[in-house]
Image (spheres, rainbow, N blue to C red):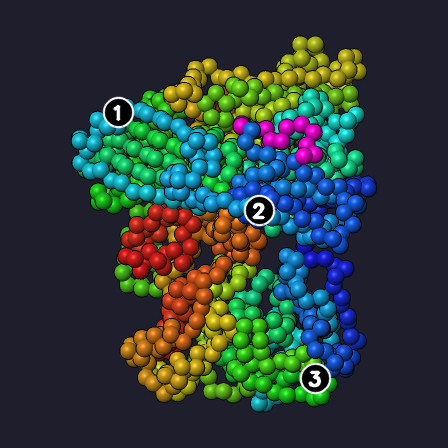
């Protein structure tokens, strides 16, 4: 134990209204605490610099799913276990099941929330690349009302995002009928389970007769300061045929587009090469 | 009415339930941090942040009530400031000189853990830094001298035949260098100690440890007390793997120093981060092989330079080096062998005992080298080994005559047949041509591991064990050999019960406590079952003979009769204790000067086979199947033995593919479970464990040691399999995906 409990303060609002009210004057002194699975690790290591936490873990308004003909809304307080067990998600958004299952251990999946995962802004998180691929929107709530931010526009830099100190990630919204014909997810971690990713790629595409890509959307983790969209690679691939040359060129574009680093878990060169390999694997799978 | 005689089947060879198993699985076992000590203080350690330099000043921040704290520095040490082990170079607390990062400098105690942690963070130290030596090449180069005259902690020279006479006769001379990395023990319970120390009671220590008498030996000079005033009690210990062989002496000394100064009981428990950063690890190594070989695969001569990184202090490096040196030539009959071995000092946290003790390092190099030779000669991996195996009547590199009736060739045949080795190898080679995404491989390693202390070690140890028939007519085993998860308690009760012809339930194991138990030596070196178990057997037989001689027991008896005999004896004579002391089996000779003779009383022999697949998209290697075949003498408890082998193989897989101690300026920067990667069950294959049992004449009921053996084989077998799958010349571990990618690109 290196975090010192008396130095920390935690407040648990009764409902979302009270939470938003507290946050309405927040200029950064309160940090939200949802599942707390990342914060507790920092705390244990004595590296949790923030001292005041607003515990939103029990707020029922943030839990649950709303499904209509057009879209699915996933409450920001939904856990990864709830997400991977949801029947519509299992049928229509398998990449979310993949990423939820790839996250930490079962105990972590039971506690960690998707809203917390997004707000934590880790470039190595397992689900954000999937949200990029599915072109998800975030519904951000504050005492002033709500606003919608497309997730691909959310991250602004390392641990910086389009999220005000008075806002809570209320829900994640994904369109149900995107016309996706193929999808791909692969996390390369430091071992088969209970690991942090070294590279992660999520992609969806609409492919005509296994030959022509009508459109494609790709999200990556652990290759940049933020969970990133491979915009240039997508731009190149849209409306292209799946030829060997195009796949090779897309791979080169992706490897130029990403900016991985050497760190404690892997090396930039490895990340770059493997990201290229994952893209190739994804594109090859589109032929089937 | 005739009394029905209960007959017993011997407990030997049966998977008798673990003595302490039910308590462990129901959470009732009390580990040191679970035990409450009233009014105890908690202790913590201030450590160096630089690898080498001098302490200029220790700064205490203003806002801490320092008068409430017990503060201990080197100046407070009542006796001598060194951890007594083999040499005396390592201080309990650095006084002026810093020789490695995380070196203990100052100790603090307070009853409030939070205030204690605040105080720990409030101390800063000013240093004068000196250039550190942080690698084997730098240490050997000796431009900067940090230890002795030449940075050499210990060296050995072993010679058989005349290697220089052979080079001109060889068809090929094949040379290469192999490297192995450090490894962290990751025992499930971190190091922890509680101490009480004052003038009238002396020092009492409770804690997690492998070797109570090592701790006692270290604390005697620290306090200048006689041994009767230093009492060491082992508490339930959650794993050791060598990590609790020498290190507990350091922590016990720290807790005792704080207890001495404060007059109170002091508890010190490391968290995982501190435990990983500051305690010992496996020695990194670098081995150069130069081999003379004939075109038919017969090895004429082995010239080996074996170097291990000992870290900043000598600790156990000399004996680790010794075992690594003796195992460097493997289970082969080679006429000309020269081994130059060195343990060098660097400014790293001292490396120490770890399951295998130098042998996994030198065996990795040899077994990988043999595969490389085989490839150059266009021979199969099994054929080159077959042509060089040692057989009964031949001599090892130290000149030890092998006459155990072991046949490596038939072990190899059994392993090849059992794993369908040839068939799989052909299949994999075919598959690898068509499949560009997955490359499959199969590889093997053949090796032996000596049981017990090296050379004259057991003779000098002169271990003692007692069996007591106590006043309540219970049978107790008195030894200092610790249960650390490996099954000591169960094995001892099986051996004693067999000797007494009774059931294991009535055998109790006395807590290792230096006040009551004799010194049966350290719990290390695969010696507990074979060496100490033999003493348990002798002492138990002594009890039985006494009961028979005094007319309480007939040569054959039922359990009821045995119990009655015990009761009757105690009623008439009081308690009975029989001691047994180690006697070297006849015909064992060892020369410490020439390093020639019988290095070990006996060896366990093994053939391990690894199957792997490599994903060429990610360069990840997965071990898909593992077969461990070994000859270990008589197996006392099959489930425990299997567990030891499986655990060792898992640890070996970690050593080969996952575990990397990431050092920056001599500090471990991945000292946590998130970034020091050990394999989980999802990374491990099915591990098939097969035993061949050739009873050893001087082991209890024929048993030999097995604890370390399974650590030796996995890494070379796996790397040999990767080499087969890829055609790459791989020479180092850990082989992480990043390393394999580099090897692919460099090729």
Question: In front here: B730 or B508?
Answer: B730
Q: Specify few, some or many for label 1: CA neighbours under 10 Å numbering under 14, 14-19, or 20 or more.
A: few
SS state under label 3: strand
Q: CA distance from mark 2 to mark 1?
A: 51 Å
Q: Which residue is mark 2?
A: B127
Q: Going from the N terminus, do you reach mark 2 or mark 1 first?
A: 2
Where residue B477 appears, as percent x and y from the top left, is 66, 25
Which quarter of the figure is the C terminus of chain B placed in?
bottom left
Which quarter of the figure is the N terminus of chain B placed in?
top right
Determine whether B632 is above or below B470 in the image. Answer: below
Determine whether A116 is above or below B513 in the image. Answer: below
Q: Specify few, some or many for label 2: CA neighbours under 10 Å numbering under 14, 14-19, or 20 or more.
A: some
Quarter of the image for residue B248 reads top right
The answer to whether dots 1 and 3 both sit on one chain is no
Q: List the single residue furthest toward the right.
A: B39
Magenta-colored span: B75-87
Q: Is residue B473 left or right of residue B102?
A: right
> Are the residues tagged 3 and 2 within 8 Å (C-beta)?
no
Q: Specify few, some or many for label 3: CA neighbours under 10 Å numbering under 14, 14-19, or 20 or more.
A: many
The chain letter for the residue carrying disc 3 is A
Q: Nearer the viewer, mark 2 or mark 1?
A: 2
Q: Which residue is mark 1?
A: B162
The chain letter for the residue carrying disc 1 is B
Is B659 contained in the magenta span? no
The dominant secondary structure in magenta is loop
Asked if residue B558 shows in the view, the reply is no
What residue appears at the point 42 percent right and 33 percent down from the top-left corner? B150
Quarter of the image for residue B359 reads top left
Q: Which residue is mark 3?
A: A142
């Amino acid at each position: 134990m290196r975090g010192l409990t008396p130095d920390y303060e935690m407040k648990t609002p009764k409902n979302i209204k009270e939470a938003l009210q507290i946050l309405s004057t927040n200029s950064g002194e309160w940090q939200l605490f949802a599942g707390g699975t990342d914060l507790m690790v920092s705390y244990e290591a004595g590296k949790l610099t923030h001292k005041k936490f607003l515990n939103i873990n029990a707020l029922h308004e943030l839990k649950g799913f709303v499904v209509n003909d057009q879209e699915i809304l996933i409450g920001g307080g939904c856990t990864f276990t709830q997400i991977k067990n949801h029947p519509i998600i299992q049928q229509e958004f398998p990449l979310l099941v993949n990423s939820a299952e790839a996250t930490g251990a079962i105990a972590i999946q039971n506690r960690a929330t998707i809203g917390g995962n997004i707000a934590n802004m880790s470039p190595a998180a397992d689900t954000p690349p999937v949200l990029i691929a599915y072109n998800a929107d975030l519904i951000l709530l504050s005492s002033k009302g709500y606003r919608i931010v497309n997730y691909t526009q959310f991250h602004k830099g390392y641990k910086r995002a389009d999220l005000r100190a008075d806002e809570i990630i209320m829900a994640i919204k994904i369109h149900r009928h995107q016309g996706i014909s193929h999808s791909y997810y692969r996390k390369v971690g430091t071992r088969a389970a209970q690991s942090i990713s070294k590279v992660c790629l999520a992609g969806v595409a609409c492919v005509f007769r296994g030959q022509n890509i009508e459109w494609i959307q790709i999200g990556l983790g652990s290759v940049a300061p933020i969970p990133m969209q491979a915009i240039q690679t997508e731009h190149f691939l849209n409306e292209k045929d799946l030829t060997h040359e195009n796949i090779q060129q897309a791979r080169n574009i992706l490897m130029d587009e990403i900016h991985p680093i050497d760190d404690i878990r892997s090396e930039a060169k490895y990340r770059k090469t493997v990201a290229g390999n994952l893209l190739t694997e994804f594109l090859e799978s589109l032929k089937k | 009415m005739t009394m029905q005689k209960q007959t017993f089947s011997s407990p030997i060879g049966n998977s008798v339930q673990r003595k302490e198993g039910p308590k462990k699985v129901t959470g009732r076992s009390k580990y040191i941090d679970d035990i409450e000590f009233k009014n105890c203080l908690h202790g913590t350690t201030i450590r160096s942040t630089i690898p080498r330099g001098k302490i200029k000043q220790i700064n205490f921040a203003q806002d801490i009530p320092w008068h409430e704290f017990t503060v201990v520095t080197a100046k407070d040490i009542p006796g001598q400031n060194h951890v007594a082990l083999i040499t005396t170079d390592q201080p309990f607390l650095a006084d002026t000189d810093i020789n490695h990062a995380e070196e203990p400098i100052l100790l603090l105690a307070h009853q409030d853990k939070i205030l204690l942690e605040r105080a720990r963070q409030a101390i800063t130290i000013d240093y004068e830094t000196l250039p550190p030596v942080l690698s084997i090449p730098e240490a050997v180069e000796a431009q900067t001298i940090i230890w002795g005259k030449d940075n050499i902690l210990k060296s050995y020279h072993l010679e058989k035949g005349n290697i220089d006479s052979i080079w001109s006769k060889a068809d090929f001379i094949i040379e290469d260098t192999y490297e192995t990395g450090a490894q962290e023990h990751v025992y499930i319970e971190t190091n922890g100690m509680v101490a009480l120390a004052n003038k009238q009671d002396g020092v009492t220590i409770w804690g997690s440890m492998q070797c109570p008498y090592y701790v006692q030996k270290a604390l005697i000079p620290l306090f200048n007390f006689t041994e009767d005033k230093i009492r060491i009690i082992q508490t339930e210990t959650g794993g050791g793997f060598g990590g609790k062989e020498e290190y507990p002496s350091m922590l016990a000394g720290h807790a005792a120093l704080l207890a001495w100064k404060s007059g109170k009981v002091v508890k010190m428990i490391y968290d995982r981060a501190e435990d990983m950063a500051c305690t010992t690890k496996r020695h990194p190594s670098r081995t150069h092989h130069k081999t003379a070989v004939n075109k038919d695969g017969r090895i004429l001569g082995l010239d080996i330079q074996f170097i291990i990184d000992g870290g900043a202090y000598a600790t156990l490096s000399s004996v680790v080096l010794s075992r690594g040196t003796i195992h460097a030539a493997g289970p082969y009959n080679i006429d000309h062998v020269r081994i130059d071995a060195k343990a060098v000092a660097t400014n790293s946290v001292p490396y120490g005992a770890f399951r295998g003790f130098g042998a996994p390092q030198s065996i990795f190099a040899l077994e990988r080298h043999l595969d490389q030779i085989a490839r150059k000669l266009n021979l199969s991996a099994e054929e080159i080994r077959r042509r060089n195996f040692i057989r009964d009547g031949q001599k090892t590199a130290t000149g030890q005559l092998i006459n155990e009736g072991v046949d490596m060739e038939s072990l190899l045949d059994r392993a090849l047949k059992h794993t369908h080795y040839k068939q799989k190898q052909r299949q994999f080679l075919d598959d690898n041509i068509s499949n560009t995404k997955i490359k499959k491989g199969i590889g093997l390693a053949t090796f032996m591991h000596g049981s017990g202390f090296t050379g004259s070690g057991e003779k000098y140890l002169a271990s003692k064990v007692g069996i007591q028939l106590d006043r309540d007519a219970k049978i107790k085993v008195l030894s200092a050999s610790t249960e650390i998860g490996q099954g000591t308690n169960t094995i001892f009760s099986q051996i004693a019960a067999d000797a007494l012809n009774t059931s294991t339930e009535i055998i109790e194991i006395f807590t290792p406590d230096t006040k009551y138990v004799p010194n049966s030596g350290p719990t290390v070196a695969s010696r507990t079952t074979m060496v100490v178990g033999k003493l348990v057997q002798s002492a138990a037989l002594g009890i039985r003979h006494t009961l028979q001689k005094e007319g309480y027991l007939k040569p054959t008896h039922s359990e009821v009769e045995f119990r009655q005999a015990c009761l009757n004896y105690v009623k008439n004579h009081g308690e009975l204790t029989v001691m047994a002391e180690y006697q070297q089996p006849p015909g064992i000779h060892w020369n410490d000067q020439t390093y020639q003779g019988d290095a070990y009383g006996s060896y366990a022999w093994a053939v391990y086979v690894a199957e792997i697949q490599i994903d060429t998209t990610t360069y990840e290697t997965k071990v898909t199947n593992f077969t461990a075949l070994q000859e270990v003498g008589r197996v006392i408890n099959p489930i425990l033995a299997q567990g030891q082998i499986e655990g060792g193989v898992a640890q070996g897989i970690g050593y080969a593919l996952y575990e990397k101690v990431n050092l920056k300026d001599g500090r471990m920067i991945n000292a946590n479970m998130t970034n020091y990667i050990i394999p989980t069950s999802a990374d491990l294959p099915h591990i098939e464990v097969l035993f061949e049992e050739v009873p050893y004449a001087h082991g209890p009921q024929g048993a030999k040691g097995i604890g370390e053996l399974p650590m030796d084989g996995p890494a070379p077998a796996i790397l040999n399999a990767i080499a087969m799958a890829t055609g790459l010349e791989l020479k180092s571990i850990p082989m992480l995906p990043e390393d394999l990618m580099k090897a692919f690109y460099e090729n």
